[in-house]
Image (tube, grey):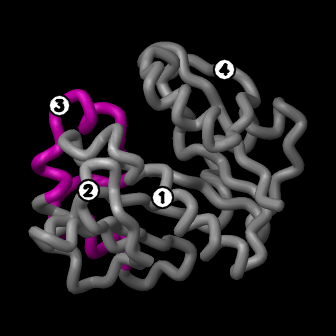
C-alpha cells in the first residue's frame, strides 16, 4: 500500500522481511532518547532483532518506507495472542483472553515523521492484515505511559478503549481495540 503523507511524500507500507533487519537496526538506533524510552518490545541489536522474528510464527513486523529516500520511517510489531505476564492484569478488567483471536501491538514512528499521519496509515494497513487472519482484538503491548499524552490521544482517535491503569515506572493505561 502506498499513501501520500501530510508532508507530501510517498510512503510504502508492507510486511517486514529478514532483508530489512539491518535497516531496522539503523532505524531503532536513530530514535530519540524519548521515543526510545517508550518503545521496547525487544532489544535493539541486530542479533536480537533476528532472533525475535526467526522461527516465530506468532510475531509479525510491519514497516513504512519513505519512497524518496528508501528509509524505514515507522515500525510496528504484532504478536498473535497476548503477553502471558499480563494475563492476570488483563483478566482483572473482565477480558476473556484468546491466544487465537487476540493480538498484542507495539508501534513506533521515527521522530521526524511523527504527526505526519504515518502511524495512522500503518495501523490501518495492519488492521486489514489482522482482519484477514480472523483476529478480533488488539491489545497495546505494555500499555501506554499516562504521561505520553500525544500517544494516548492517538490511540483514542484510532478507537482504542482504556481498560484500566497500572503502575510500572509510572502510571500506564492498558488499552484495546475491537476489530469489527
Q: Nearer the viewer, residue 19 or 50?
A: 19
Up-down relation of residue 144 to residue 120 (above or below): above
* Residue under label 2: 8
Q: CA distance from mark 4 to mark 2?
A: 38 Å
What residue did someone put label 1 on?
A: 121
| Residue range (magenta) | 27-53
Report helix, strand or loop for mark 4: strand
> Which mark sits nearer the N-terminus, 4 or 3?
3
Q: Nearer the viewer, mark 3 or mark 2?
A: 2
Q: Please, what secondary structure does the residue beneath circle 2 have? A: loop
Structural crowding at the residue carrying mark 2, measured as other residues with C-alpha within 10 Å and reported as few (<14), some (14–19) or many (≥20): few
Looking at marks 1 and 2 on the same chain, the residue that comes earlier in the sequence is marked by: 2
Neighbourhood count class around disc 4 (C-alpha, 10 Å): few under 14, some 14–19, many 20 upward: some
Is residue 25 shown above or below 86?
below
N-terminal label among 4 and 2? 2
- Image coordinates of residue 70 in percent, x first then y, are 14, 73
Q: Which residue is mark 3?
A: 33
Distance between the alpha carbons at the discs numbered 3 and 1: 24 Å
Residue under label 4: 165
Image height of 86 relative to 61, above or below? above
Amino acid at each position: 500500500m502506498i499513501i501520500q503523507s501530510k508532508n507530501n511524500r510517498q510512503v510504502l507500507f508492507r510486511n517486514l522481511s529478514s532483508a530489512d533487519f539491518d535497516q531496522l537496526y539503523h532505524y531503532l538506533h536513530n530514535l530519540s532518547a524519548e521515543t526510545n524510552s517508550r518503545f521496547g518490545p525487544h532489544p535493539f541489536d541486530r542479533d536480537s532483532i533476528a532472533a525475535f522474528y526467526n522461527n516465530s510464527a506468532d510475531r509479525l513486523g510491519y514497516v513504512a518506507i519513505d519512497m524518496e529516500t528508501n528509509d524505514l520511517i515507522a515500525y510496528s510489531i504484532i504478536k498473535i495472542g497476548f503477553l502471558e505476564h499480563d494475563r492476570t492484569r488483563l483478566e482483572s478488567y473482565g477480558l476473556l483472553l484468546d491466544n487465537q483471536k487476540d493480538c498484542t501491538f507495539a508501534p513506533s514512528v521515527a521522530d521526524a515523521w511523527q504527526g505526519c499521519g504515518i502511524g495512522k496509515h500503518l495501523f490501518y494497513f495492519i488492521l486489514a492484515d489482522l482482519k484477514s487472519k480472523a483476529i478480533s482484538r488488539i491489545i497495546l503491548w505494555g500499555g501506554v505511559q499516562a504521561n505520553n499524552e500525544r500517544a494516548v490521544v492517538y490511540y483514542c482517535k484510532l478507537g482504542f478503549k482504556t481498560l484500566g491503569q497500572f503502575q510500572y515506572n509510572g502510571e500506564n493505561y492498558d488499552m484495546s481495540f475491537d476489530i469489527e
